[in-house]
Image (cartoon, helix red, strand yellow):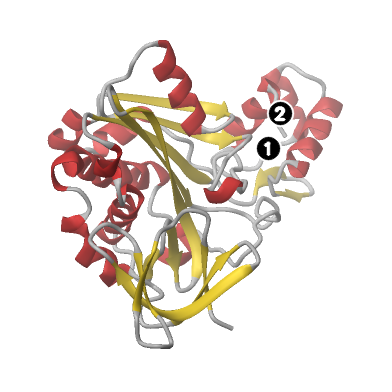
Amino acid sequence: MELLEIHKAIIKRMADGQFFSGQQLADELNVSRASIWNYLKTLETAGFDFHAVKGKGTRLKLAIELLDKQRILTCLSSEHRALLKQLDVLDVCASTNQAIVEKHQLTPLPNGSVCMAEMQTMGRGRLGRSWVSPYGQNLYISFLWNFKGGISALSGLSLACGVAVCRALKSLGLNGHGLKWPNDILWEGKKLGGILVEIQGESQGGYTAIVGIGLNYQMNELSSGEIGQPWVDVCHAYGEKMGRNKLAAHVLAEVLSILHGYEETGLLPHVEQWNNYDCYRDKTVRILSGEQYEEGVASGISKTGELLLLTPDGRTKKIMSGEVSLRLSE
């Protein structure tokens, strides 16, 4: 559902997890007390989890650290701030990929343009799947980078960006995370995040890559109901809050660094590290394509990003991402 301005005002006021009485909120927001309770019920339907105590009031069960552009910029080194040409921090949008594309269509954006949002109403994942995107609980970030060369220069870009996210998590002290080909970020087998790369342009004029990254930061059970697989968030994996803005800054730094050199180097410098992060390496897997599937042992990726599948007859087969999905064999 799309939040009204009054809903967003309530969440921003309650973001720190402190108790508020209905009358206090009503007075501050200039609405009736009855309206406040109706708004809170609507927010509960939208996935916000509240805790009420008689005599104290109501609070968010999990405090929310709202995105703060200045705090993010402060966490970046001068080198990384130089790579970041534009940073838009939105409240709510359909998707950050769509938002940055629409802005680029109006006026061409420079390399290093980034869009973030508190919430996506139509977040998208790979193969047309929806991406659960509740307000203030996760990271939704899109990067724009223009490439002068052919489409082949973009081969494996999502894999390299997966390495970047893993580096960001490691730089903050997180262990146990890894990658699942082609674009999932896992922690101990549960989904922590994902990457969606969309390409626009023509060979004569070069290509524009939009790199969308979704990373679960601190998501409550009410918001996660539509996720159809085991999932985890960074705060649970880390054991404490590392800071949503701090995490965003580290992701920005690592992804921008990879995008900056990608046209020249391609995937090759990142293949070894991707293979080290590969959660399914040396495990028996199934490659699903529609109703068909093929089994084998996952053996890392090639220098151009194909999955290397060791088949039962001893051959090594290269699998391109396309419309296929990877699963552990049952």
- Whether residues under marks 2 and 1 lie with C-beta atoms below 8 angstroms apart, the answer is yes
Please state the horizontal and vertical placement of residue 159, each as a whole percent of the image: 33, 55
- The amino acid sitting under disc 2 is Gln
Which quadrant: the N terminus?
top right
Viewed as shown, does residue 213 lie left or right of 254? Answer: right
At x 59% / y 43%, what residue is drawn? 133
Viewed as shown, does residue 134 lie left or right of 250? Answer: right
Which quadrant: the C terminus?
bottom right
- The amino acid sitting under disc 1 is Phe
At x 72% / y 41%, what residue is drawn? 46
Please state the horizontal and vertical placement of residue 240, each as a whole percent of the image: 43, 61
Please state the horizontal and vertical placement of residue 120, each as a whole percent of the image: 58, 35
Q: Nearer the viewer, residue 109 or 134?
A: 109
Q: Secondary structure at mark 1?
A: loop
Please state the horizontal and vertical placement of residue 137, each as a whole percent of the image: 54, 46
Which circle marks residue 24 in the picture?
2
- Label 1: which residue? 20
Q: Which quadrant of the view contains residue 298?
A: bottom left
At x 20% / y 43%, what residue is drawn? 262
